[in-house]
Amino acid sequence: MKIADRDREQLIRWRRHLHQYPELSFKETNTSAFVSEALKRMPFLEISRPAPTAVMAVLRGRNPGKTLAIRADMDALPIEEKNTFEYRSSVPGVMHACGHDGHTAMLLTTAKLLSENKEKLSGEIRFIFQHAEETPPGGADELVNAGVMDGVDYVIGTHLWSPLETGKIGIVYGPMMAAPDTFKVTVIGKGGHAGLPHETIDSITAAAQTISSLQQIVSRATDASEQLVISVTQIAGGSADNVIPGSVEFGGTVRTFNDELRNQIPGKIEQIVKGVTEAHGASYKFDYTKGYRPVINEERTTRILHQTAAGLFGEDSVTLMKPVMVGEDFSAYQQKAPGCFFFTGAGNKKEGITFPHHHANFTIDEKALEIGVKMLTKAAEAFLSSDHE
């Protein structure tokens, strides 16, 4: 399916509008309304609201066949945008710093093109516009529980990826994105005067040694062939130069692919926390929260997307990537049907589009949007065809 100039222009307008008016997780009221209204102008779509700020459109082809789900996320991040282009965020402290505006615009365009070619299709396509990917418990599980995946044979999705140059499609076979768990520790000591440390139980010293010791889990208590990240990302304690605080809080994240290892980590962290704090005469509180499941791409659906990219853009356009230790709730859909999540390159070093995701200067090369649409429309044709059976 060719993308006409008017569709290309609309694609960019949609993305820029969404970028200018971002909304946080579970608050995508205007975004979902915008998406719903855009879908209503397209032929043959059955539109529903499986969650208050989510939208699904169903397209049924001329003949019965397989059912494919395509997912895009819509939420933004609590970041103050530093870009200065005309369509920068108009909402203080909220920004599309991860590309979800592009994901939504690409899926809208994909729905338009496929709905206009309904007579050439067999089977069913579900266009899932998901809320709340950025904030656990996330929107994917809520939509799965609402039935959006019932009867689905395959599920696919893409993520615009600034570390990958525009024109490249990133494919990962098997484990792709990690399970992002979080933890919080409170070290409880005995506060007092900084000039009389012997009269205190120093919570800062105990916390510092605990944090340092946690890395022993990765380097000495885990098989070196396993992929594991433990990062302490927050620490708070103390309020004056001459006061040793009574407690210190710190927390962070754990990233894994292996379920067995994932289940072992909370006990290993608490064992170190308990040992170090007790050695200092302190006590502790420990909380551990499991996040999304890991994204693990199914072999067959991944191969079809690989072949789709190679057929569209040439084998040289396909980059076989290593797993990345970020999290994604696309994994919820993969519990219900074979699925693959792939990267659409959106970086451009020549134009200075190199800022990482979740950065205040993040943006995408808008040429990547059309590439993403071509991938999704062609992949839909491939998955609904009997040729790959």
Image (cartoon, rainbow, N blue to C red):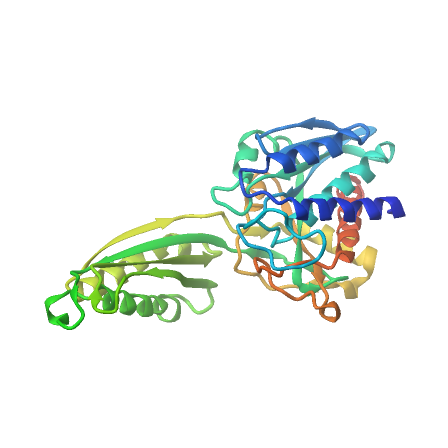
The residue lying toward the viewer, choosing from 386 and 274, is 274
Residue 388 in view in this figure: no
Q: Quadrant of the C terminus?
A: top right
The residue lying toward the viewer, choosing from 342 and 357, is 357
The residue under the point 80% across, 50% down is: 374
Q: Quadrant of the N terminus?
A: top right
Q: Is residue 40 above or below residue 108?
A: above
The residue under the point 46% across, 58% down is: 255
Q: Is residue 211 above or below residue 19?
A: below
Q: Residue 322: which quarter of the image? A: bottom right
Q: Residue 382: which quarter of the image? A: top right
Percent of width and height locating residue 177? 55, 55
The residue under the point 77% across, 38% down is: 111
The residue under the point 72% across, 54% down is: 86
Percent of width and height locating residue 260? 41, 53
Which residue extends farthest bottom? 195
310 sits to left or right of 353: right
The residue lying toward the viewer, choosing from 29 and 294, is 29
Percent of width and height locating residue 271? 26, 59
Residue 14 in view in this figure: yes
